[in-house]
Image (cartoon, rainbow, N blue to C red):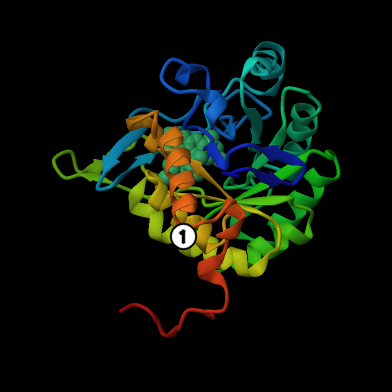
Amino acid sequence: MDLSVKIGKLELPYPTLMASGCYGSGEEFEDFADLSKIGAVVLKSVTREPRLGNPMPRLVPTPAGMLNAIGLQNPGIDWYLEHEVAKFAKRPCAVIGSVAAFSVDDYAYVTERLAARSEIAAIELNISCPNVGSEGETFACDPALTGKVVRAVRSVTGKTLIVKLSPNVTDIATIAAEAESAGADALAVINTLRGMSIDVHAWKPRLGNLTGGLSGPAIRPVAVLAVYEAARAVSIPIVGQGGIETATDALEFFLAGASAIAIGTANFTDPRIPEKIVNELGGYLNARGLRSLRDIVGKANAGFGTPFQYEGDAG
Ligand SMILES: Cc1cc2nc3c(=O)[nH]c(=O)nc-3n(C[C@H](O)[C@H](O)[C@H](O)COP(=O)(O)O)c2cc1C
């Protein structure tokens, strides 16, 4: 069964990526999972300067998911290049670097340095960050800013560039199209949804940072729709993600138009999920007499038109 996928210049034997911030660099999972059976690990986002992250608590369980506000804790690009990156050469799967920043220049600076390393197969751009030099608007929530940052990063690396979109927008299709025309090789859809949980005894938000990002099965329908809409707007591959726990969940994303998927929160409960998904995808295709995963990509997104919105989606 052919489950291989091509994302830009990157050729992966399996369509399963481990989502940024949810799998370390793979090392921590080696005792529980066979890393040669996954497509790639996307590393925790790295920034120009070291970051200590947000005050505790940083994780709160929620119905069918969780809120996190880690605050992009990482050692900064200098330390990372000197002490971490060489270890990634030993991984039996592709390693994708993830870059976060708070200005266009810093996105380009960190990407250029990280992408120059042979251990890094591709770059994912986490653009769900505020542009602090300006009015603090989130890069991923503004089509013009998305275009600007993707163009700047595109000019410093020829490696495969995956741009990760935020669901916290009104029209993800416009942002997806902007990222594609600015030079993205692929899109990752979606990052977490903004959320808050309040302790009714303490009368205060549960997260140290007050707000956080919602992930897990609770966001899956939002993510599937985002992939569906982005897939209609672009012709580059999409890495679908948001609440995937089973092969059936993954299939929703492929049918909506994703060429690959990423698994995040589910790894915290069962590190064998990625391998199970790969095995079951093979079984699904086999049962239908199909030979390749590519035969089903976008099949629920071919000619059914735009969802009706005559009075919004309110009910
Ligand atoms: C604890 C935690 C940390 C995360 N850190 C990052 C990060 O550093 N960079 C990033 O682009 N996404 C980060 N994410 C988002 C995930 O990569 C993923 O896109 C999102 O959680 C949706 O997938 P899931 O529902 O399968 O977790 C993080 C998510 C979690 C739960």
- Please identify the residue farthest to the bottom as the structure is shown: 310
Q: How many marks?
A: 1
Vertically, is 71 above or below 310? above
Q: Is residue 78 left or right of residue 222?
A: right
- Please identify the residue farthest to the left as the structure is shown: 201
Q: Position of residue 108 (x, y in %)?
A: 78, 39
Tell me if I can see residue 193 in this picture: no
Vertically, is 282 above or below 143? above
Residue found at x 64% / y 62% = 175
Tell me if I can see residue 111 in this picture: yes
Residue found at x 47% / y 17% = 28
Q: Position of residue 12 (x, y in %)?
A: 66, 37
Q: Position of residue 55 (x, y in %)?
A: 40, 28
Q: Foreground: 216 or 156?
A: 216
> Which picture quadrant has residue 16?
top right
Residue found at x 37% / y 30% = 268
Q: Quadrant of the N terminus?
A: top right
The local secondary structure at tag 1 comes to helix
Q: Which residue is mark 1?
A: 224
Q: Quadrant of the C terminus?
A: bottom left
Q: Foreground: 22 or 73?
A: 22
Q: Is residue 268 left or right of residue 35?
A: left
Q: Position of residue 37 (x, y in %)?
A: 53, 29
> Which picture quadrant has residue 103?
top right
| Crowd around label 1: few <14 · some 14–19 · many ≥20 (10 Å) | many
Q: Is the C-beta of the residue carrying label 1 under 8 Å from the nearest atom of ligand 1?
A: no
Amino acid under disc 1: Val
